[in-house]
Amino acid sequence: MKIFIIHGSYGNPQENWFPWLKQELEKLGHTAFVPGFPTPKNQSLENWERVFEEYIEKVDGNTIFVGHSLGPAFILSVLENLENPKPVKACFFVAGFIGLLNNSEFDGLNRAFSVREFNWSKIKENCQRFYLYHSDNDPYVPLEKAKELSKKLNCELKIIKGAGHFNKKAGYTEFKLLLEDIKKELK
């Protein structure tokens, strides 16, 4: 199985629980990719798509996506544009959102990714299952945004108490629940 872990705005492959998750998945014999995207300088949907071009041929029915914060909105764009005959196995969205956050620092950076008409039927056609995780006290992404995404994807939303933005600042250098749920899809 190939697992892609996608960071968000101001993020990078070495932060939060990403290195830990990559290592745990590789211990299980899977291949994990954690691409680095330009942020905040040169952050645009087009630039992120350019970075992901080297990986797109690897995306198939044996693929899992994991996205944090802005990562899920980018993954939605990838799914929307896939032309594979087989949908990806699953997507795991952590603190994901669409639309504006009413935060001037992030809304300008995120707008091209999250403020647009998504082709929801194509997105759902290109992924077998969606998993959503959100905290009841995320300082950046309101819970209503996760509920909106859950409704659009017609999937369950797992609300984790006190997890903040699921980042290092909130104590998330590991994310065991996420790993356990991913393992269910690796069978």
Image (cartoon, rainbow, N blue to C red):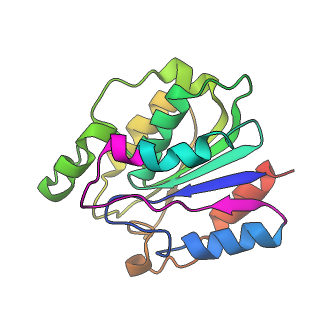
| 46 left or right, relative to 61 | left
Image: 121 above or below 154: above
Name which quarter of the figure residue 167 lies in: bottom left
Residue 25 is inside the magenta segment: no
Please state the horizontal and vertical placement of residue 83, each as a whole percent of the image.
62, 23
Identity of the residue drawn at 63% across and 76% down: 20
The magenta-colored residue range is: 29-48
Please state the horizontal and vertical placement of residue 40, each as a whole percent of the image.
26, 61
Q: Main secondary structure of the magenta part?
A: loop
Residue 30 is inside the magenta segment: yes
Number of marks in the rendered image: 0
Q: Nearest the camera: 6 or 37?
A: 37
Q: Residue furthest left?
A: 104
| 121 left or right, relative to 181 | left
Identity of the residue drawn at 53% across and 79% down: 173
Can I make out residue 77 in this image? yes
Can I make out residue 99 in this image? no
Q: Nearest the camera: 166 or 38?
A: 38
Image: 6 above or below 148: below
Please state the horizontal and vertical placement of residue 114, each as a whole percent of the image.
32, 39
Identity of the residue drawn at 81% across and 52% down: 186
| 44 left or right, relative to 164 | left
Identity of the residue drawn at 78% across and 58% down: 183
Please state the horizontal and vertical placement of residue 92, each as a whole percent of the image.
59, 49
